[in-house]
Amino acid sequence: MKKIYQKERISRAVARSCHRNLLERLPVELFLTEYDEGELISGQQENHLLQIVVDGALSIYYVRYDGSSYSLAYNRKDSILGEVEFLGGEAIGGVFAEVTQKLTCLAFSTLENREALLSDAALLRMIAESLIGKIQMITMHNAAQPSLRERVCAFMRYKCEDNRLKGVESAAFQLHCSPRQLQRILNALAAEGRVRKTGKGCYELVGEALSLQD
């Protein structure tokens, strides 16, 4: 993540936002954040940031422990990030926001003037509308079940420490497949150069982070 404090760029972004009137009167210091394609947006709670999408796109999805996943939302301009943490909730484990197109957001810290922000009816309404939109997308979404190959990639990327799978049998149990099936997938990925064998029953992802889709 890159933070930008250029006043002219911030002013242009505010002027283009549908939340312009609210942003211009909130008691906060606005700045821009930039994320590269493939970057995961995390640490909202730790950084105390509320972010509003200016340009670009991201996909929000949930990854189960066995590596299977489903999309929660696909956000574009004026979508909001960090609203659950702002309201005092903890970040939901297994939920990821991945940048799919270089992303720029308007952002501000919610740590300062927190009580004033929590008392702002217009801000709370904006957050409520954002959460309702995401819930509607969750309930309406019927994603196709991912293939075992996709689940293996997701499992290694999101559930294995340092993207390293250790132990084919134990991983197969978590992925709900046979060790032979998993080994066949790992061999194919190794042949393609997407994973590298580092020891007996141990594999790691190679190169740039893999996406959930082939």
Image (tube, helix red, strand yellow):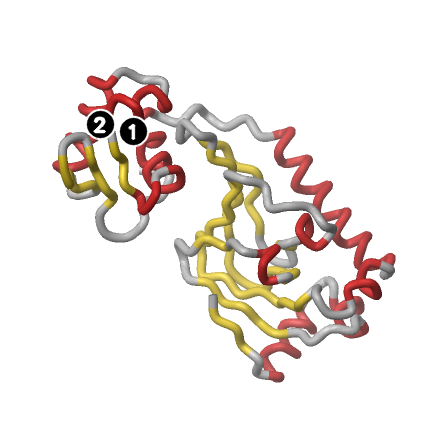
Residue sitting at x 51%, y 54% = 42
Which label is found at residue 185? Answer: 2
Disc 1 residue type (three-letter): Arg
Residue 171, placed above or below residue 54: above
Residue sitting at x 64%, y 54% = 82
Q: Which residue is mark 1?
A: 149
Q: Name the secondary structure under disc 1.
A: helix
Q: Position of residue 35 (x, y in %)?
A: 46, 63
Q: Position of residue 67 (x, y in %)?
A: 40, 31
Disc 2 residue type (three-letter): Ile
Within 10 Å of disc 1 (Cα), the crowding (few <14, some 14-19, many 20+) is: many
Which label is found at residue 31? Answer: none
Q: Quadrant of residue 7?
A: bottom right
Q: Is 106 positioned to the left or the right of 101 in the image?
A: right
Q: Name the secondary structure under disc 2.
A: helix
Residue sitting at x 73%, y 70% = 112
